[in-house]
Every structure is written in C-alpha cells, then in structure tokens.
Amino acid sequence: MFLFTVLGTILNAVLSPLRPLILFFMIDKFVDGKTEFNGFMMNWLNDTDISIAPENGFWYWTIIAVITIVTEAILRFITVYFTNLIGQNIIADMREKLYNHLTTFKTQYFDKNPIGRLVTRLVSDVEAASEIFSNGIITVAGDILSLALVIIVMFTTNWMFTLMVLIPLPILFWATNIFKNAIKKAYQLESTQVSKLNTFVQERIIGMSILQLFSREKIEYKKFEEINKLHRNAHIKSVWAYSIFFPIVEILSSISIAFVIFYASYQIIDRPLAETSTGEIVAFIMWINMLYRPIRMLADKFNVIQRGLVRAKNIFEILDDDQIIPTHSSETKYEKYEGNVEFDSVKFAYNNYDYVLKDVSFQIKKGQTVAFVGATGAGKSSIINILSRFYEFQSGSITVDGNDIRELSLEDLRQNIAVVLQDVFLFSDTIMNNITLKNPNISKEQVIEASKFVGLHDFIMKLPGDYDYDVKERGNSLSTGQRQLISFVRAYVYNPSILVLDEATSSIDTETEELIQTAIDKLTQGRTAIIVAHRLSTIKKADKIIVLDKGEIIEQGNHEELLELNGTYRNLYEIQFEED
C-alpha cells in the first residue's frame, strides 16, 4: 500500500511537466508549422514525430496528450486514495495504542487531568496528527519532486524564460517562512482552546442537574461564551494568515507570467528573427502554474503538518508519560487467592507529603469480615485504593497470602478483588453486559443464578427486555439502590477471593438497605470481606471493626468489645442511634 502511494506520487510528478511540453510541440508543429526545435526534450519529441506519417501526426500527439491527462488522473486517484487509507490506518493504530496506554495509568493521573482534555487527545488530536501522513509527508515529497522536475524541464527548454519566472521566488520563500511560523503559533493556541472548550462542555453536561438546581444556567452560559470566543479568535488567527498568504502567492504567480510575456514581447519586437514561439509562451504559462501550485500546496501542507505536529506533541506527551502502575518482570501469578491480607506500617499520601495513612498495620485472615469506620477523611477509602493498587503507597508493605502486592500480577490481583463502590458506574449498555462486562467466560445462566442469589432477578424480569434492558448513560434509568444491587451481582459472578464494599449503603433508603444488607450477608459467606461503613448498624456482625482517625488506627475489636471500651466507636454508635 505504501509502495503504491510512493510509486503513484513519483509517476504523477514525472508526467505533469510533460503535458505542457507536448502542447508546446503540437502548437509549434501543427499551428506554426515549425520543423526545427531547440532543447533536448523538444528534439526528442521531434525525432519521435519523424517516424510517424505526416497525415497521422496531429491525431497521434492528440491521443498521447489525452493518454497523459488520463494517466495523471488515475495516478492522482491512486495517490489520494492510498495516502488517505494509510492515514486512516494510522488513526486506528494510534488511537488503540493511546487508549491502551491510558488504561495502564494510575488513578492519580485521571484525578489531575480533565476528562474533556483526554477525550480531545484521543479523538480530534489523533485525527489531526494522522494528517501528517495522509496529506503531509508523502504529498509534500511529491510536490517537491514535481517542483524540481518542472524547473529542470523549463531550464532545458529556455533558460532565459526560466530565470524570468524565478525572479519572484525569493519573495515567495520569505513569505512562506513567515506564514509557516504564524500558522504554527495559531494552531498551538487553537489546540489549547479546543481542549478547554471540550473540558468545559463535558463537565457542564455531566453536572447539568446541579446547574439547573442552583439556577446557574445564565452564569455558566456567560462562561461558555467567553471560552467559545477565545476558541473562535484562535481559529481566526489561522484564517488571517491564510487570507494574507494565498493572495501573495497569486500575485507573485501573475508577476512571473508578466515577466515571461514581457521578455517574449521584447525579443519579438527587438529581434524579429528570435526563436520565441507561441507554443513556448503557452507552455511556460502552464509551467508557471505548475511551479506555483506545488509551492502554494506546500504552504498549505505546512499548515497540515504544523497542526499535526502540535497535536502529535500532545499525544506523545501522554504516550511518553510514565505514570503507569509499576509492574515487575518477576510478577507472581496465582489462579485463586485464599484471601489473607496484611498491612504492615503502611504510609500513604496522594500528594507524596500530606499523609492520609500513617503507619497503619492490621491483619485480615481468610474468610474474615473486617469493617473500617471513622470520620470523613480518616483514610478508610484510601485503604481500599492502595489494596487494589489504584494508588501506590510510599512505605511499608501490603501482602496478600504472604506475597507483596507489588510482586503479584496486577491483572490477577484485581480479578481476585471485587470492589463495590458507593457511586456505582454503569455503562450505556444492557444489564447483562454491565454485569459481565462482556466477559465471554461468564454465561447468562451464571448471571441469572447470581441475580436470584442477590434478590434482583424478579425486578430485572419486569423490565422491557429483562436482561437486555438498556440502562442508559451511567445507569440513569435505574434508582440508586437498583444500580447498587447490579454491582453486587457483578461482584458475585466474578467470584472474588476478597470482597470490598466502600460505603455501599450510605445513599439508599431503609427498605433498600435491608435488601442490600441481605445481599451483603450472602456475598461475604466463605470469602474475605472488607467493609467501609457509614452506618454502623450494617457492621455489627463483622469479625473485626477498625476505627480510624486522621490516618491512624485508634481502636479495633468486634462490636461488643468496642462498645465496652467507651471510646470513639461507642460515641459514633450512640450519635447514630440517637439520630435513628
């Protein structure tokens, strides 16, 4: 495919200068009646014509001219088609590589980078970068080759005319350089504004209910107007550069034609016997257009390349980013974990200096249910985040079945740990696909069995399409409790060794809480369970309760033991009991 493109580009560049040459020969031969010609190329055409019968000469060269034009068109089609095909393949490959790379990043990376910015990088930036290949490098190489061949043919035909044509070129090169620098700055600014615009729109659409609830529509609209205005102004700068540059190219092209006509007229008037012919003037006018067209196209391609380079820089910044979850070549792989977990003097901070966990140590034995309680910001969810390796802890050790989690296969670790979060995320897809996540190893029978086990099957069967019901974006067609139960079914079908529940009952009503509590009791049977609890009534049956305060463990024991201590846990329990 690449060879077809290169070959088509080369042949097209070679054929283009021959068309005016053939027309030059035909006008001089059949209109002016010349029999002698100057220049290597013209003599070669004349030698070819001698072998042809005089009555057939005109039609012979007419057919040659038509064949040349048709061949040019076919070659141009091949070049355009295959260069764009290459570009589309590059788009697909680059998007896949970028998406795959993004999936290896730490959660911390996504905390710092807006979703709209990443979507811009993955969609529009990749497409713009691919233009370097589909409309950039190969096309530019073809234009340069065509430019060189046109100049060579012009010099071999009439070197004085050629010098007349080339007089304005220094001005053109100077203008092209200024245009190139101006367009680069314009596209850098445009790229930044596109990213800001996408980020703003994405965030406001997701949070539309908040905007409407607090009557922020007009205020946010004014912000959008300002961002949109900056994006428009950035684009206008590139349009302004174009509107200045292309008229300059046209003017210089016209000046070259004027120089040729002026010089030809001077020769005819001053030297009547001069060898200047009508065909020669026509050919040079065509060559001038062929000369300036590649230069004009080169400038246009500079725009494509500059835009592509700016966007490619954004892409490679992500591809070169090393914020991936560290893995080791000696990772240990286990098919199934037993579920023994141990934290030993673990310190963790999201920003590397403000520790949210300070020398945390505890043990969870196989099959135990351990709950973590404490005030907001005490470090409960952080324990889950580092156990699942969404974030990396700074010091200490975390082991599962006696193996450091950093030495375990990341894929294996996460297959053995199922996390049910407070804010359940569902994809815009069917209930079946949201439960299985399109895992081919999970059958529909397993999903139905799990749904019956959790107590969700009857509800699903009442929906249109039952398990094929589309839950819409983020599962918005379902209630919070229904989404939560689907996440329980999802956890159950993956049959994890360690089940993690992060505030799973904090945002639901009492009736749904009872249903979910029943599901929790069933799910935790026979496996290690870690529960981050907001409502203490849900963890009374836990084997161990660990109380956290400002990143440190201050109490631990079962429900009765902690009440007898008359400490923080008892205070929390009594406060909630009074509220209830």
Image (cartoon, grey):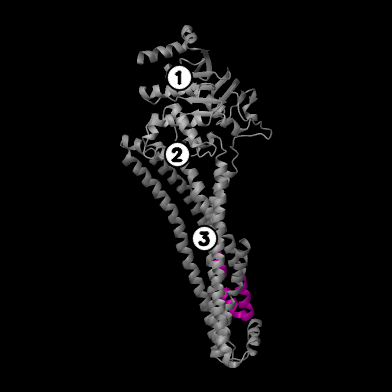
Q: Amino acid at mark 2?
A: Phe
Q: Which residues are magenta?
A: 148-174
Position of the C terminus, as image quadrant, is top left
Nearest the camera: 255 or 242?
Answer: 242
User: Which mark sits nearer the N-terminus, 1 or 3?
Assistant: 3
Q: Is residue 356 visible?
A: yes
Asked if residue 564 lies left or right of residue 141, the reply is left
Q: Residues within 10 Å of mark 3 (few under 14, many from 20)?
A: many
Q: Quadrant of residue 152?
A: bottom right
Q: Quadrant of residue 171?
A: bottom right
Report the residue marked by disc 2: 427
The disc label shown at residue 419, or none: none
Do the CB atoms of the residues marked 3 and 2 lie less than 8 Å apart? no
Residue at x 46% of width, y 67% of height: 247
User: Which mark sits nearer the N-terminus, 2 or 1?
Assistant: 1
Cα separation, mark 2 vs mark 1, equals: 31 Å
The disc label shown at residue 375, or none: 1
Image vertical order of residue 556 relative to residue 87, above or below: above
Instruction: Please state which of the two labelled residues, at mark 3 or mark 2, is closer to the viewer.
Output: 2
In percent of width and height, residue 241 lies at 47, 60
Report the residue marked by disc 3: 179
